[in-house]
Image (tube, helix red, strand yellow):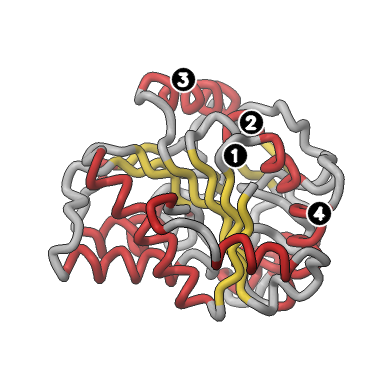
Amino acid sequence: MEVVIVPDAEAGGELIAEAMAQLLRHKPDALLGVATGSTPLPIYEALAAKVSAGAVDVSRARIAQLDEYVGLPTDHPESYRSVLRREVLEPLGLDMAAFMGPDGAAADVQAACAAYDKALAEAGGVDLQLLGIGTDGHIGFNEPCSSLASRTRIKTLTEQTRVDNARFFEGDIEQVPHHVITQGIGTILEARHLVLLATGEGKADAVAATVEGPVAAVCPASALQLHPHATVVVDEAAASKLKLADYFRHTYANKPDWQGI
Ligand SMILES: N[C@@H]1[C@@H](O)[C@H](O)[C@@H](COP(=O)(O)O)O[C@@H]1O
């Protein structure tokens, strides 16, 4: 695992967008796994700016969804499919033909989960998976004590995650669904490169547990320690509880340019 400490969220967004651009330059039809939440927005803005500037061509890129609420109509403004259309596809000039995601409104949700895992494999697997992190260490919607080998499946949200996400539902927790579909931790670990961005002091404990704690299902993001190519990008506030922060800074500052992230 590589830990990169950046001054702020904007710098993290730029660093990760450049990694995505480099991937697309040598693999124009790369399958990019994207995440929702506030944290990745600087990544999407930086990538869209590169597209506008002609620095990268995303026209053949494919986009894969990480997780979804169960029970919201597909066209609900807060379904993650709608969110990703607004925040990722439209700014990049991609249409929904480039998109793949689980069907949270399916009559048979379990079948939809299995179908999504199969579709990801048939698409050749995710090349680069972006991840945020919940305050409880969740990735996607894999809440604490999710199996580290889990596949795409239905999960029940913790009260904390529903409280955290109520801001997208007019601050009304009653509107936040209890159930979700999420790529499993085992599914996520199959992506070729995992890139987790965490910003703000509220993520400091989760980041410390992810990077310096034991690999344990109680902190789902700690599963990144098992991946051969995982990059954790954090701002100073999110890095504030890392004991090895100086080591991570030294390592990154002395890394040859050609290594990328
Ligand atoms: N399912 C999403 C996660 O993928 C995301 O990482 C998390 C953190 O969101 P934020 O970046 O807004 O803190 O929120 C949700 O729970």
Of 202 and 251, which appears nearest the observer?
251
Judge from the rendering whether residue 100 lies leftward or rightward of residue 1; answer left or right. left
Residue 153's tag is 2
| C-alpha separation, residue under disc 2 versus residue under disc 1 | 5 Å
| C-alpha separation, residue under disc 2 versus residue under disc 3 | 12 Å
Residue 108 lies, with reference to residue 244, above or below; the image says above
Which badge, 2 or 3, is on the more N-terminal residue?
Answer: 3
- The amino acid marked with disc number 1 is Ile
Q: Which residue is mark 4?
A: 212
Residue 181's tag is 1
Q: Of helix, strand and loop, which one carries label 4?
A: helix
Residue 97 seen in the current view: no
Q: Of helix, strand and loop, which one carries label 2?
A: strand
Foreground disc of the pair 2, 3? 3
| C-alpha separation, residue under disc 3 versus residue under disc 4 | 33 Å
Instruction: Tell me where residue 87 appears, x and y as whole percent.
Output: 36, 64
| C-alpha separation, residue under disc 1 versus residue under disc 4 | 28 Å
Q: Which residue is mark 3?
A: 118
Query: Pointer 3: residues within 10 angstroms few (<14), some, or many (20+)?
Result: few
- Residue displayed at 64% across by 67% down: 250
